[in-house]
Amino acid sequence: MKFIAAAIAALSLMIPSVSQAERSKMQKDMRMVAPALEKYTQGTLLGDVWKRPDLSARDRSIVTLAALIARNQIVEMHFHLNLALDNGVKPAEISEIITHLAFYSGWSNAMSAVAAAKDVFAARTIGTDQLPQASPQLLPLNEAVETQRATRVEQQFGAVASGIVQYTTDILFRDLWLRPDLAPRDRSLVTVSTLIASGQVAQMPYHLNRAMDNGLTQAQAAEVITHLAFYVGWPNAFSALPVAREVFEKRPH
């Protein structure tokens, strides 16, 4: 009896959170419909892209989750939520990614992600004690930088839509961006990934510069675009390339 119990315990330690059964089902589904897709998934995507050195597995999970949520692609959400947790993304960080993306990809997309994450959190016995407070102590604000940003946006758009200008200042940059359970670099990583995933490259210069100010390197930024080509398509990735090139060239070396 002791031997059986020990064997079960040992076996449970060998089973990753992204279960072999889940992986096998995905492979079987692809094999039945698109065998070439399975080959590219196993050989290129999982066997090569996810192992490229300029972006950590944790960062790749953050980028992938941001893309899936931004595009409301639920089919792979459970797999990538589990993979993100396995790769070191904390439950509190996943919670903040979803909250952040309510503003950058819409409430409905965030609510779809809530439904998927609820099941994953329940299966892994992740309780509310591991999640961020609704109203935490905020990070310090760089008043000079924020005043400059707010003044510029007010001059450009205050007479067009004063409401969104005010919410942008009061809610986004004086509240959401200062929540402490997702580091500024990671918020920038999520935002840039979402803009690329949504094809919204017009705001990329500001947010890519902000990401690099927050610690994202040029090599990492380039790798984000490379990674996203596989999750949001080559056209969206190539649309981001001219913007990234311009940002890289204008930044001090």
Image (cartoon, helix red, strand yellow):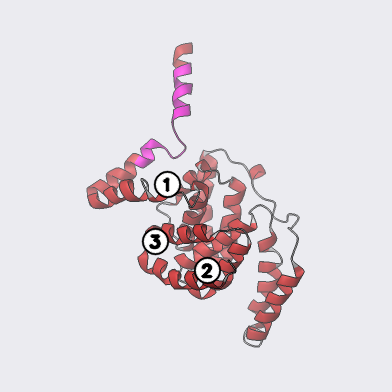
Kind of residue sitting beneath label 3 = Ala
Kind of residue sitting beneath label 2 = Phe
Inspect this view and state whether residue 106 appears. no
Mark toward the start of the polypeptide (1 vs 2): 1
| Residue that carries the numbered disc 2 in the rendered image | 248
Mark toward the start of the polypeptide (3 vs 2): 3
Q: Where residue 120 is drawn, which disc sits there?
A: none
Residue at 60% from the left image edge and 69% from the top image edge: 252
Determine whether, in the image, residue 100 is placed left or right of residue 222.
right
| Residue that carries the numbered disc 3 in the rendered image | 229
Mark 1 to mark 2 CA distance (whole Å): 24 Å
Magenta range is 6-23
Rendering coords of residue 16 (x, y %): 45, 35
- As drawn, 127 above or below 49: above
- Mark 1 or 2: in front is 2
Residue 217: within the magenta?
Answer: no
- Circle 2 — which element? helix
Q: Which quarter of the rendering shows the C terminus?
A: bottom right
Q: Residues within 10 Å of mark 3 (few under 14, many from 20)?
A: some
Residue at 74% from the left image edge and 66% from the top image edge: 142
Residue at 67% from the left image edge and 73% from the top image edge: 167
- Circle 1 — which element? helix
- Mark 3 or 2: in front is 2
